[in-house]
Amino acid sequence: MAKSGKEWVQGIYTLKNPDKYLGDPDKVIFRSSWEQEAFKILDLNPKVVAWASEEIAIPYPKPLPDGTGDYTIAQYYPDLFVAKEETNGDVTREIIEIKPYKQTQASRARKPQQRLQEEYELIVNRHKWAAAEKWCKQYGITFRIMTEKDMFI
């Protein structure tokens, strides 16, 4: 969850165009102010023909935190699925994960326990993203990670 000002932002997004949403239109939950802003853009953009949030489950090997190299199979629910009409009339499909840039990089934490936790989270995320890339390639969908560097340029 991202922090906006001094408060954590989370809630239910009220759709303006529920016919474009691929899921339960009453349960469109944003977990950060960044997701909330992305939902608004997708909902209102006439080029977006369909979209969803956390509606697709992708299995991935989740490493156990004990460092043994063992893993369990878990489900990854990417933040967004977007189908967009391009200028030439083609429809492109994309899965997008919204993450703070810091969470896509190696930890710089000074405290060893915090560094271990952040490094484990990055390893888990990399497994999720690798599984998503493989899954997307199978279905002709693009996968990308979007950070604040992409959103707020």
Image (spheres, rainbow, N blue to C red):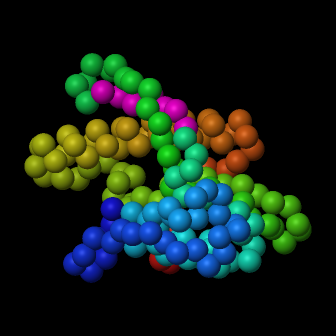
Residue 86 position by quadrant: bottom right
In the rendered image, the vertical position of residue 148 relative to residue 136, given as above or below = below
In the rendered image, the vertical position of residue 119 relative to residue 79, given as above or below = above
Residue 80's spot in the image, x, y percent? 56, 57
Residue 99 position by quadrant: bottom left
Between 74 and 119, which is closer to the camera in this rendering?
74
The stretch in magenta equals 58-64
Secondary structure mostly seen in the magenta stretch = strand
Residue at point 52%, 52% (across, down) = 54
- Please indicate, yes or no, whether residue 144 appears anywhere in the rendered image: no
- Please indicate, yes or no, whether residue 120 appears anywhere in the rendered image: yes
- Position of the N terminus by quadrant: bottom left
99 relative position to 108: left or right: right
Residue 26 on the magenta segment = no
Q: How many marks?
A: 0
Between 85 and 117, which is closer to the camera in this rendering?
85
Residue 59 on the magenta segment = yes
Residue 9 position by quadrant: bottom left
In the rendered image, the vertical position of residue 124 relative to residue 102, given as above or below = above
74 relative position to 144: left or right: left
Residue 125's spot in the image, x, y percent? 41, 43
Residue 46's spot in the image, x, y percent? 74, 77
